[in-house]
Amino acid sequence: MDSRAQVFTSWLASLDFDDESLQEITPAQALPLLGAFIHAVANEGFSKTRALTLTAATISGHLWAARDWLAAELGVVVDISADDGTAKLHPFLADTLAARQAWTAPKPKREPFTSDMFTYMFDDISKCAAAKPFVLFDLNAAIFDWTRLGTFTGSRVSEYAQTSARKGTFSRDPDSLDAGNWKNAPITFMFSDFTFLTKAGRVVSHNRLQQLGHTVHELHICFRFDKSPLNFTIRKFRRSGTHFLCPILGGISVILRAIALRVPPNEPIGVYCTSNKVMYTFLRSYDVITRMQAVCRLAHPDKDSFFYKNAALMVSHSNRVTAAVTLQNAGLSIDNIAFRLRWSPESVKHYLRDCSHAVGELTLQAVKGALLSDVDIASISSPVTLYTIQCFTPFIVVYIHYF
């Protein structure tokens, strides 16, 4: 609101309004003034290219910010509602918003990550790790673990990666009484948010995952801070029993990587390392987007394919689309999907796409197994299924011992 109010004051200054002339504005004059302002925002926007991208909702936000500025700074209270007593806007203002709403082309829909993308990443990391085990700590491996885990959690990228903090730093909870014991804690996941349990309900501590990871049956994740009233929600996930696309294996990998890189308990565990030194940096949303778009083109190399041509639609929010679509195809209702993913039913409808072919059978069976079936751990014996534990753990032991 403040930045949009500054746009309004800049616009007034461009019309040669000064402190004296501003004081002379009356409520009757303010209405056409606001109309002229949002018309300018919509059609000029102080940048011709910028004006074309503004949605009706954004233009409306400028309107309300300008109205509130007039009331707060000049004491000019403007009634911008229609004369018929309804909650509708005055036609002089509504017409500008309606025109933008009617003629704006919708943005392309985000596409879900595909089974082929996850398969490509797994095969690529496996091949590289056979020659250079340290790649299990690098950016590609970290992104693979967090995105395959996000297939089950429907996580926003801000829950595991940094979206605004400078490289090498991380966003924190406010240093205030409101945050209580969590002040200055990372907003993203940290060690205490992940709890591993055996089928008998016994907790497997993080420092014993190297030896007992194969006994883990459930992963409980605490989503401390959400964009909703559902802070500190806990969701539970079981082994999927489907190849490498498993929430348990993904969870174990991110914890073991953070332990090996010596991440302190009060820092984010979304980390990676790009050298053979014990120095880590925090995963960023930009890293996730650029890598997954590249993977899309590599996993779908036909340049005439839908996925190759639309790789730009693979964004960090694609994890949320993947989760929503897959759960729907697994037979869950809108309300059940909303509960599993900590969303409102309206948000679920927004993310659902008619694209089950793009998700793939592997992803569908993995999510369905993790959420709906009781998989017997003893039956999961494929060397590929236990890749993360079988291949990752021995190197961590040697790595920690060496350093």
Image (cartoon, rainbow, N blue to C red):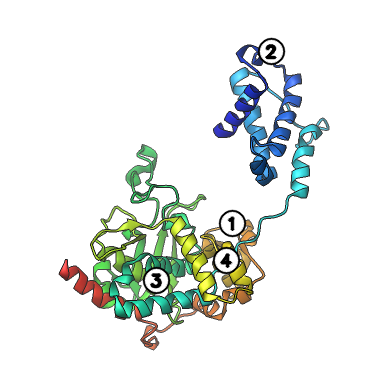
Q: Nearer the viewer, residue 339 or 201?
A: 339
Whether 95 is drawn above or below 296: the answer is above
At 29% from the left and 52% from the top, the residue drawn is 266
Residue 17 percent coordinates (x, y): 65, 18
Q: 10 Å neighbourhood of mark 3: few (<14), some, or many (≥20)?
A: many
Q: Are marks 3 and 1 in contact (CB under 8 Å)?
A: no
- Estimate the spatial distance between the alpha carbons at disc 4 and disc 3, rounded to whole Å: 24 Å
Sequence-first tag of 2 and 3:
2
Q: Label 1's element? A: loop
| Rendered-image quadrant of the N terminus | top right
Residue beneath label 3, please? 250
| Mark 4 or mark 2, whichever is nearer to me | 4
Residue visible at 60% across and 26% down in the picture:
10
SS at circle 4: helix
* Between marks 2 and 1 in the image, the one whose residue lies nearer the viewer: 2
Q: Position of residue 27 (x, y in %)?
A: 73, 20
Q: Are marks 2 and 1 in contact (CB under 8 Å)?
A: no
Residue located beneath label 1 in the image: 344
Give the amino acid at mark 4.
Answer: Ala
Q: Is residue 177 visible?
A: yes
Q: Residue 283's image quarter?
A: bottom left
